[in-house]
Amino acid sequence: MSQTPWNNISSQSFQPFLEFSGESTGGNLKVAVDIKEPSYNGGGNLTFSGTLEDDFQFSARLFEGKLQLADSPVHFTYSVKSNGSSLLGLSLEFTSAAAEQKSVLLASSGDSLLTMSRFVRHFDNVIIPHRVTKLESELSWVIQESSIAMEGYMLTKIHAVSYKLRPEVHKSESQGKTMALSPSEYHAVLGHLAINSLTLNSDFPPSTSWLVEGNFTKWSSSDSNGSRKLNVKLVWKLKGGKTYPFPKYNIYVKKQPDLSIAESNGSLQLVQEYLGAAVVEAYYVSDLVVPSGTSSVTFIIQVCSLDGALQKLEESPSLDLNVQGS
């Protein structure tokens, strides 16, 4: 059982079914489900690590199925964290009713001209992300968004494609010949992949629009050092009976130290701890350890939209509870 706060089973959705393919002479690349490195948003990661020559690519199958596409575009959003020149894209395979097959590469952000020249012979279509953003809380994660319209086709396979954009070569001074460099290190992490066919507006209701309550609250002693344990059922709903189709809520807790103790220790910085995720408007917190010297705890309900966007933590609904019996 993992103790890492980001590896939370309540945050996991459909899991990939991995199968690898690539040129064995182009390096040594391994793919693994990683629970050690902090994830994009709870759950786990897919880590691609090893060596990969610049003129080779490595493919790992993530999903295989049958998804019939309509006349509206399909939007793909995925998060990547990578080192140096390591790039990670998505390969899509489509089949028509007449058994015509097409392959599309959702390339990583970068030099569009180099990307097209590199892959135009390998795919029927190469798409550059139309939007690339970085998380405010974790700048190493890059969120890439691409869209494609394939009416009448069926999406059958999704692969992750590892590659390097610029071939690195050098010339031998004695012979004047171009020689390929030895395989170079490659490391990239796939945090999540979201697919939808809706054009969505990720406007969230303000925090004041929500009613957040704590039911069945129970405080108990944890140890001789004065720590407490908290059990509470968090419930929330929009005021006025309004409803929104939010698919998930991330739950965080922030522990407020007693100001006199914090000032004497010089530790006034507050850190949000990730607890888990809920797909309904309720979440049960069990045996949450609250250190001595804590005056209150704040539970933050981060709203997630259908397109994968997350409400800013400072703008999310929350509930404050004073520590009792300390």
Image (cartoon, helix red, strand yellow):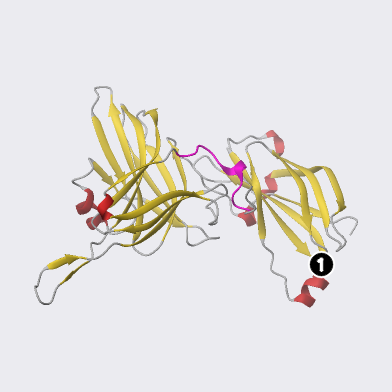
Task: State left or right for residue 199 relative to residue 185.
Answer: right
Q: Residue furthest left?
A: 175
Residue 292 to residue 304: above or below: below
- Nearer the observer, 305 or 182: 182
Q: What residue do we see at 49% from left, 39% from top?
A: 15
Rendered location of residue 64, percent (x, y): 39, 33
Q: Is residue 201 above or below residue 112?
A: above
Region of the chain picked out in magenta, as a range: 5-16
Task: Judge left or right: residue 308 versus residue 236.
Answer: left
Evaluate whether residue 216 shows in this view. yes
Q: Would you name the residue on which mark 1 appears?
A: 258
Residue 77 forms part of the magenta stretch:
no
What is the three-letter code of the residue carrying label 1? Answer: Asp
Q: Is 214 situated left or right of 171 in this image?
A: right
Residue lying at 66% horizontally and 58% vertically, measured from the top left: 272
Most extreme residue toward the top is: 98
- The x, y position of residue 258, in whole percent, is 81, 67
Instruction: Judge whether 257 appears above or below 303 on screen.
Output: below
Residue depicted at 41% across the width and 49% down the height:
31
Left or right, residue 166 beside residue 276: left
Which part of the image, by quadrant, shows the C terminus?
bottom right
Report if residue 237 is visible in the image: no
| Residue 8 part of the magenta segment | yes
For the point 25% across and 34% down, the residue is 102
Q: Within the image, what quadrant is residue 167 found in?
A: bottom left
> Dot 1, how many residues are within 10 Å of its Cα: few (below 14), some (14-19), or many (20+)?
some
Instruction: Please provide percent x and percent y for residue 4.
Output: 62, 54
53 and 272: which is toward the camera: 53
Disc 1 element: loop
Q: Position of residue 3 (x, y in %)?
A: 65, 53
